[in-house]
Image (tube, helix red, strand yellow):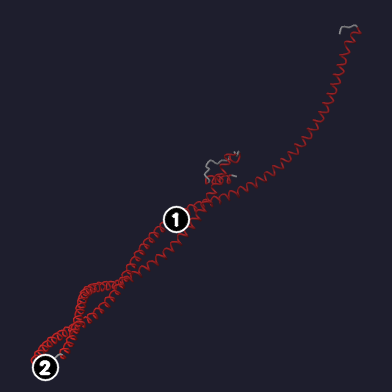
């Protein structure tokens, strides 16, 4: 019984009840018993809730570790992609620099060609105007030459027989013809010059076409360079964005590491608390088991004593039954004697009463004073 009481006291102290005593066995009170049972139930629920919380924290720790492994894999992938983009950017940086310098040279050359084109367009416009003027002059001169030939034919038909006059007219006509020849030669010379200028213009047009083609090629190269520059800028922006994502992932990894460390510390604290509680509980359970075994032995001994006491009580009960039966028999006998005595007394009283009633009458008949 003492061992059981000690185990119960340890259980009560663990449950937060420090005033447990033997009176709670011998004279239990309902409010106090209710408080004791409530403390024991709360202790059991507290242990179960801590165990459930520990399991939840352990599950969250596993999820956090899995998430950390996923983030590490993603971080490694991003680092590989970053190194790849960095190597590619470094490899293409020389090309970009060469293309930018070439683009600058081509832009300067295109600017120079544009200026030359404007100058040549002005010259071509002026030369075309001159060509048109010369063509008009040649047409006029041809028309005048045709008219002159017609007049010469008319004049030949109107020739007179005067030799002097004929000589004079011939001299005039030769002079006029000479003038016309010089004029035609001058026009032909101008025509040849215009033809040479036209050939020069055609050559200039050819060069201009070549320059335009070169300009178009340069424009295509500039477009390609711009596309390459845009691609490089896009790659740089993507690289910067990847660096920002990597930095964010690093921050997230640090935050998760801190959470994991805090969770592991909490798990370790809860585990140590649970281990301490479990050790105490196991020790208390072992002690309680020993005390229970001792209590069982004491109970067995008490049962044996109770059996002996029960036999003794049964014997006493039988003796009491015998005494009770003897007492009842004596009481019945006494009742019978009392009844007989009561009847005798009643008979005596009845007879006495009758005698007392008859006494005055007898005295009257006898002449005595009653």
Tell me the element at label 1: helix
Using the image as rendered, state which of residue 276 and residue 184 is in the foreground.
184
Neighbours of disc 2 within 10 Å: few (<14), some (14-19), many (20+): few
Residue 161, which numbered label? Answer: 2
Q: On screen, 135 above or below 227?
A: below
Q: Which residue is at the far left?
A: 164
Rate crowding at label 1 as few (under 14), some (14 to 19) or many (20 or more) other CA atoms within 10 Å. some
Quadrant housing residue 158: bottom left
Residue closest to the eye, 87 or 274: 87
Query: Picture quarter containing residue 129?
Result: bottom left
Q: Is residue 95 left or right of residue 281?
A: left
Q: Cα distance, mark 2 to mark 1?
A: 143 Å
- Please name whichever residue, 109 or 40, is drawn nearer the observer in this view of the structure: 109
Would residue 176 be found to the left or right of residue 344 on screen? left
The residue furthest front is 161
The picture places residue 143, in percent across and down from the top left corner, at 20, 84
The correct choice, above or below, for 99 with respect to 174 in the image is above
Q: Residue 64 in the image: state x and y as whole percent.
A: 45, 59
Give the quarter of the figure containing the N terminus. top right
Work out whether 169 lies above or below 54. Answer: below
Query: From the viewer's perspective, is the residue at label 2 or at label 1 nearer?
Result: 2
Q: Between 161 and 60, which is closer to the camera in this rendering?
A: 161
Q: Can you give x and y, in whole percent of width and height, for residue 20 in the image? A: 55, 41
Question: Residue 112 — which label?
Answer: none
Residue that extends furthest to the right in the rendered view of this protein: 365
Q: Which residue is mark 1?
A: 263
Which type of secondary structure does the marked residue at label 2 adopt? loop
Quarter of the figure that contains the C terminus: top right
Residue 294 drawn at (x, y percent): 60, 48
């Amino acid at each position: 019984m003492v061992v059981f009481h000690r185990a119960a006291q340890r259980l009560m102290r663990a449950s937060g009840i420090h005033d447990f005593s033997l009176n709670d066995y011998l004279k239990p009170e309902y409010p106090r018993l209710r408080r004791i049972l409530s403390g024991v139930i709360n202790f059991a629920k507290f242990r179960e809730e801590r165990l459930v919380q520990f399991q939840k924290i352990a599950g969250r720790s596993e999820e956090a570790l899995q998430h950390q492994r996923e983030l590490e894999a993603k971080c490694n992938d991003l680092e590989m992609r970053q190194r790849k983009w960095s190597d590619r950017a470094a490899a293409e940086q020389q090309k970009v620099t060469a293309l930018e310098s070439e683009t600058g040279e081509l832009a300067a050359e295109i600017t120079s060609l544009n200026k030359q084109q404007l100058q040549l367009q002005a010259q071509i416009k002026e030369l075309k105007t001159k060509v048109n003027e010369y063509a008009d002059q040649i047409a006029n001169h041809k028309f005048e030459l045709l008219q002159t030939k017609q007049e010469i034919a008319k004049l030949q038909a109107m020739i007179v027989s005067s030799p002097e006059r004929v000589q004079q007219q011939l001299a005039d006509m030769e002079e006029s013809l000479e003038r016309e020849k010089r004029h035609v030669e001058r026009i032909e010379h101008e025509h040849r010059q215009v033809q040479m200028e036209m050939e020069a213009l055609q050559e200039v047009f050819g060069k201009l076409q070549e320059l335009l083609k070169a300009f178009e090629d340069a424009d295509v190269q500039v477009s390609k360079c711009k596309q390459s520059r845009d691609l490089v800028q896009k790659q740089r922006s993507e690289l910067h964005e990847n660096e920002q994502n990597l930095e964010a992932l690093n921050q997230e990894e640090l935050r998760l590491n801190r959470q994991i460390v805090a969770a592991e510390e909490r798990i370790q604290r809860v585990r140590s608390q649970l281990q301490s509680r479990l050790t105490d509980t196991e020790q208390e359970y072992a002690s309680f088991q020993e005390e229970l075994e001792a209590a069982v032995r004491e109970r067995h001994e008490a049962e044996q004593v109770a059996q002996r006491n029960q036999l003794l009580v049964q014997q006493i009960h039988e003796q009491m039954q015998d005494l009770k039966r003897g007492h009842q028999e004596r009481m019945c006998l006494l009742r019978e004697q009392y009844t007989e005595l009561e009847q005798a007394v009643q008979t005596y009283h009845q007879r006495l009463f009758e005698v007392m009633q008859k006494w005055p009458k007898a005295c009257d008949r006898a002449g005595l004073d009653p």
